[in-house]
Image: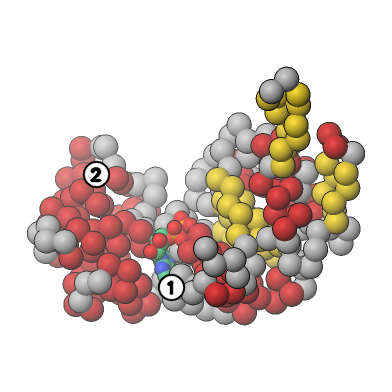
């Protein structure tokens, strides 16, 4: 095992704008970062890339609606007749000086986000009430959160008092030329095959605005491309990687299939 995180080659990430510089400056200035954007557009890959580039460990937490403050901070566990404290991922990140990535933070319960507040202002402390500790975050600790503003949960948005603690970046699906390069690199398909999938996505995204909850993501295009690369005909690859994951609605599926037929 190599212990030196700086020795790990960062995973491939194709920058779209100035996001790498913003991330690095936020890290150096000890500012928490919020990344907004639709699913499958590169948020997680970006954070993994930047953590490796900066040589800082990354701890990721997938937030869901029953994520409690104890899930983040830690809890006492009973074992062998005694209780022992176990740090949660946030506490581990603070102790280690890691980047803590809270994926889909809006999903977490409101009381959960409150534990982030003393960490996201200039105190940079994590009070661990149960153990009586007050941990001071080392300079390399950084809090990064993401959320998808497209999910229209009327009740689920970040409280202004939480979101105003972060500097924020908006992500979207990359411009066609950039997305083509990403699909070709990630799936090992030719430039022409990748370009054809991206052209299809451009048409499907127009439709998505009114007929689908979520547009076709870069992730889905990469799945289709990988199946094509492995030998599945393009039409079938698009059916299983694009139509099936996107919709159960017969009329929408037919409309998607028609657009795919026009492309492949
Ligand atoms: P999100 O976290 O936004 O849901 P991911 O980061 O998991 O999405 O992106 C899905 C996939 O798309 C990644 O695994 C990666 O293969 C690819 N991807 C998207 N954007 C980029 C990019 N800019 N550079 C490299 N790969 C990308």
The CA distance from mark 1 to mark 2 is: 28 Å
State whether residue 5 is above or below residue 86.
Answer: below
* Identity of the residue drawn at 32% across and 69% down: 186
In the image: residue 85, left or right of residue 3: right
What element does badge 1 sit on?
loop
Of residues 14 and 210, the one nearer the viewer is 14
In the image: residue 15, left or right of residue 234: right
Q: Is residue 112 visible?
A: no
Q: Does the residue at mark 1 contact the one at mark 2 (Cβ under 8 Å)? A: no
Which residue is disc 1 drawn over?
A: 12
Instruction: Please state the horizontal and vertical placement of residue 135, each as a whole percent of the image.
Output: 85, 51
Of residues 78 and 233, the one nearer the viewer is 78
Instruction: Please state the horizontal and vertical placement of residue 261, each as a whole percent of the image.
Output: 11, 58
* Identity of the residue drawn at 83% across and 34% down: 130
Which residue is disc 2 drawn over?
A: 244
Q: Is mark 1 within 8 Å of ligand 1?
A: yes
In the image: residue 27, left or right of residue 221: right
Q: Is residue 77 visible?
A: yes
* Identity of the residue drawn at 49% across and 50% down: 150
Quadrant location of the C terminus? bottom left
Residue 233 image label: none
For label 2, the crowd category at 10 Å Cα-Cα, with few meaning under 14, some 14 to 19 and many 20 or more, is few
Instruction: Please state the horizontal and vertical placement of residue 123, each as a whole percent of the image.
Output: 88, 58
């Amino acid at each position: 095992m190599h212990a030196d995180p700086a020795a790990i080659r960062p995973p491939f990430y194709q920058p779209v704008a100035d996001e790498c510089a913003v991330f690095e400056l936020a890290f150096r200035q000890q500012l928490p970062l919020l990344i907004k954007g639709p699913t499958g557009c590169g948020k997680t890959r970006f954070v993994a890339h930047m953590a490796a580039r900066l040589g800082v460990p990354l701890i990721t937490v997938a937030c869901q609606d029953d994520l409690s403050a104890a899930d983040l901070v830690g809890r006492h566990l009973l074992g062998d007749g005694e209780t022992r404290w176990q740090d949660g991922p946030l506490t581990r990140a603070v102790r280690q000086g890691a980047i803590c990535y809270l994926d889909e933070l809006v999903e977490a319960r409101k009381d959960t986000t409150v534990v982030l507040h003393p960490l996201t202002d200039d105190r940079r402390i994590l009070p661990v009430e149960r153990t009586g500790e007050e941990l001071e975050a080392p300079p390399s600790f950084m809090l990064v959160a993401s959320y998808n503003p497209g999910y229209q949960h009327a009740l689920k948005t970040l409280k202004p008092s939480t979101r105003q603690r972060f500097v924020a970046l908006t992500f979207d699906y990359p411009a066609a030329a950039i997305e083509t390069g990403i699909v070709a690199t990630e799936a090992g398909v030719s430039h022409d095959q990748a370009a054809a999938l991206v052209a299809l996505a451009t048409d499907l995204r127009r439709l998505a605005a009114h007929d689908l909850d979520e547009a076709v993501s870069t992730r889905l295009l990469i799945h289709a491309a990988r199946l094509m690369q492995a030998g599945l005909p393009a039409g079938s690859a698009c059916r299983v990687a694009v139509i099936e994951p996107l919709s159960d609605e017969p009329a929408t599926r037919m409309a998607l299939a028609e657009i795919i037929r026009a492309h492949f």
